[in-house]
Every structure is written in C-alpha cells, then in structure tokens.
Amino acid sequence: RKADIGDVEDAMEDDRLVDKLKRGSVKGKGQDDEEGELFTVDTEGSKEHLSAKTRREIARAKLFPPKAPKIGLSASEEAKIARAEGALKTGKSQPSSSSKKGPDVFDLWDAPIAPVKKTFHHPPPKQTPKTLHQKVSAAPAVLPAHEGQSMNPQTEAYEELLCTAAAKQLEAERE
C-alpha cells in the first residue's frame, strides 16, 4: 500500500528527542540550554469538538490523498503532458505557426489551391461463379443415419439395424 507514514516518523522523532533529553539530564549536561526544546506551542488545537465522522475523514485524507483521474493515457503521454505544463509555467512557449511559416505549413485561411485530381486504378468487377446457386450433384449432402443408430433407439429399430448389418456381413463372406 502507498500510505503516508509521515505521522509515524514524526512520533518516532519526538520519542528520540525525549530520550536524548532524558539522557542529557541524567548525565548532568546543561539542563538550562535544552529546557526551551521541551515545551512547544500547539498550533493545531485539539480535535475534541469534531465529530467522529469528520475525524475519520481527516485521517483518511492524510493516509490516502486524492488520486488523479484516470483518463486513459500511457506513462509516456503523461510525461509529455507534464513537460508541456512545466514549459508553460517557466514561460517557454511552443513556436507558433505564424512565426514559422514555410511552404510545408498548412494555413487554413490562405487562398484555396486547386485540388489535385488523383487517378485510381479500378480493378474489373468480380463475377460470381455460374454454379453458385445450382445443385452440382443429385446425392444428398449428408446421409441420414438409420433410426437404430440413435443414442436411445427403440428395440425394434435396433434389431432391424443388427439384422441388416449381419446380412451384409454374411453376404460378403459367401462371395
């Protein structure tokens, strides 16, 4: 997580300072010199008058600062935008089109130039085959299966299929 740990670091720094001052007072170093550092002026005030909801919102704002809206830009595009913003803030402006006018610069308000007529090579129209909508063969595209070949055939249909298969097999053996 990306959390702001500045408050924790400040508290740890305060603890170190207190420990340093305690060690200094035990050793007998100049207590009068460091007394001014023991007392601070509270500029923030207590948050007792705030509701729990408001305190929670303040804590969330410290931990999770508002994020920039996602507008679908890549990192390089965001860097380009940041550079352009920086250039605008420092006073460096982009070269304007009026100061740099050459033959390669298009000016919308200039006199119209005669349009160049381009010739395109048009291939001949493609023709459909003559046999597209005609039946090529008298045979059916798919041969329907015997009803005894279904997943759950009726007993009579299955026995009929077995008899025809056995008859074909016996006839093939006789020849």
Image (spheres, grey):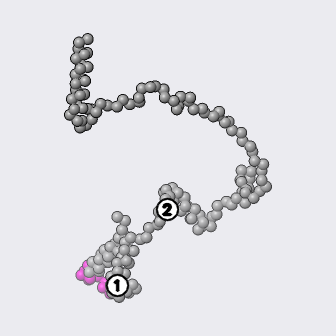
Query: Label 2 amino acid?
Result: Ile
Residue 24 included in the magenta stretch of the image = yes
State the residue in front, 121 or 4: 121
Placement of the C terminus among the 4 image quadrants: top left
User: Element at badge 1?
Assistant: loop
Observer-nearest residue: 39 or 136?
A: 136
Q: Circle 2 is placed at which residue position?
A: 71
Mark 1, residue position: 51
Q: Is residue 166 magenta?
A: no
Give the numbered dot on residue 85. none
Q: Position of residue 34 (x, y in %)?
A: 33, 84
Per the picture, the main secondary structure of the magenta-coloured stretch is helix
Q: Is residue 34 visible?
A: no
Task: Give residue 18's position: percent from left, percent from top.
Answer: 29, 79
The residue lying at 39 percent from left, 84 percent from top is 44
Quarter of the figure with the N terminus? bottom left
Disc on the earlier residue, 2 or 1: 1
- Residue 142 position by quadrant: top left
Residue 143 visible here: yes
Residue at the image position 36 percent from the left and 29 percent from the top: 143
Q: Residue furthest top?
A: 175
Which amino acid, by three-letter code, is at mark 1? Answer: Ser
Q: Quadrant of residue 93?
A: bottom right
Q: Is residue 144 left or right of residue 174?
A: right
**Residue at figure coordinates x 73%, y 56% from the top left:** 107
> How many residues crowd mark 1 within 10 Å: few (<14), some (14–19), many (20+)?
few
Q: Which residues are magenta?
A: 23-32
Alpha carbon separation for disc pair 2 and 1 = 35 Å
Above or below, comparing residue 117 to residue 50 in the picture: above
